């Protein structure tokens, strides 16, 4: 049998791990669909939703100009009053962090004109089967009002917290507008500005490189 001291130590380790996992939080504030970008956003939140997000902490660039993931925070939660409120589960290594990016997963929740799956698809998460079948797509037409756009992302609980402000959906149009399902990763545009780029897989562990 374990001694009381060993059990106490194990309990403290488990409690510390649970605290670290619960400490990282993310808020994703969406642009008002009836605000400055109404022409593009009016119906977007009726057709698209963010399933989850990740904060990826990266090491320095290697010889192939890629960065290894040294911290991976999976963020999930609920959407209320224009904001996704997520709690994150964290996996970290002891390697130093050189930079940080955010990743979001977007899926359709209503039939629309959707593109092909061009990323590592997870059926249990995306649940897009009926929306991307040829029979359901053949009569769909592009609707410019079915975009979504993120105004701000705030992440607390990291060694260096994140405050990404997209400011306006017109600054780097159309790279601030999200029109379809997929995996998207933030990339710096200069200064405090950020835009979205498509990502072709979702890294769910440490050691992968992007």
Image (tube, grey):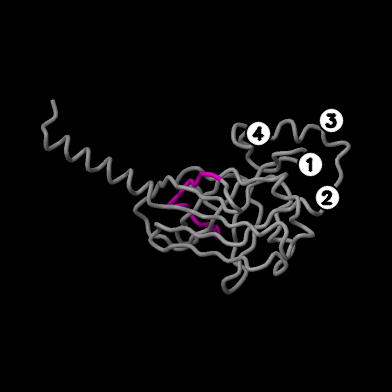
Apparent side of residue 201 relative to residue 26 in the rendered image (left or right): right
Q: Spatial distance from mark 3 to mark 2, Cα to Cα? A: 19 Å
Residue tagged by mark 1? Answer: 112
Apparent side of residue 193 relative to residue 138 in the rendered image (left or right): left
Lower sequence index among marks 4 and 1: 1
Magenta run includes residue 154:
no
Horizontal and vertical percent position of residue 101:
53, 58
Q: Residue furthest top?
A: 1
Q: Which of the 4 quarters of the picture holds residue 149?
A: bottom right
Q: Which residues are magenta?
A: 62-78
Q: Spatial distance from mark 3 to mark 4, Cα to Cα? A: 17 Å
Identify the image quadrant of the N terminus.
Answer: top left
Label 4 environment density (alpha carbons within 10 Å; few <14, some 14–19, many ≥20): some
For residue 127, the mark is: 4
Magenta run includes residue 72:
yes
Residue tagged by mark 2? Answer: 143
Q: Residue furthest right?
A: 139
- Residues under numbered marks 3 and 4 in contact, where contact means CB atoms less than 8 Å apart: no
Residue tagged by mark 3? Answer: 135
Marks 1 and 3: which is nearer the front? 1
Lower sequence index among marks 3 and 4: 4
């Amino acid at each position: 049998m374990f001694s009381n001291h060993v059990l106490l130590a194990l309990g403290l380790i488990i409690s510390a791990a649970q605290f670290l996992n619960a400490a990282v939080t993310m808020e994703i504030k969406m642009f008002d669909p009836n605000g400055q970008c109404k022409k593009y956003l009016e119906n977007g939140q009726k057709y698209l939703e963010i399933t989850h997000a990740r904060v990826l902490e990266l090491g320095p660039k290697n010889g192939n100009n890629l960065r290894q993931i040294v911290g991976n925070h999976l963020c999930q939660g609920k959407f209320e009053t224009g904001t996704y409120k997520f709690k994150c589960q964290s996996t970290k290594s002891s390697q130093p962090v050189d930079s940080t990016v955010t990743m979001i997963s977007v899926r359709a929740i209503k039939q629309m004109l959707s593109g092909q799956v061009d990323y590592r698809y997870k059926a249990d998460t995306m649940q897009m089967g009926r929306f991307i079948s040829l029979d359901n797509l053949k009569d769909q037409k592009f609707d410019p009002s079915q975009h979504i756009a993120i105004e701000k992302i705030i992440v607390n609980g990291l060694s260096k917290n994140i405050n990404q402000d997209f400011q306006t959906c017109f600054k780097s149009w159309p790279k601030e507008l999200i029109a379809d399902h997929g995996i998207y990763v933030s990339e710096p545009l200069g200064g405090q500005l950020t835009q979205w780029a498509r990502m072709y897989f979702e890294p769910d562990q440490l050691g992968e490189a992007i």
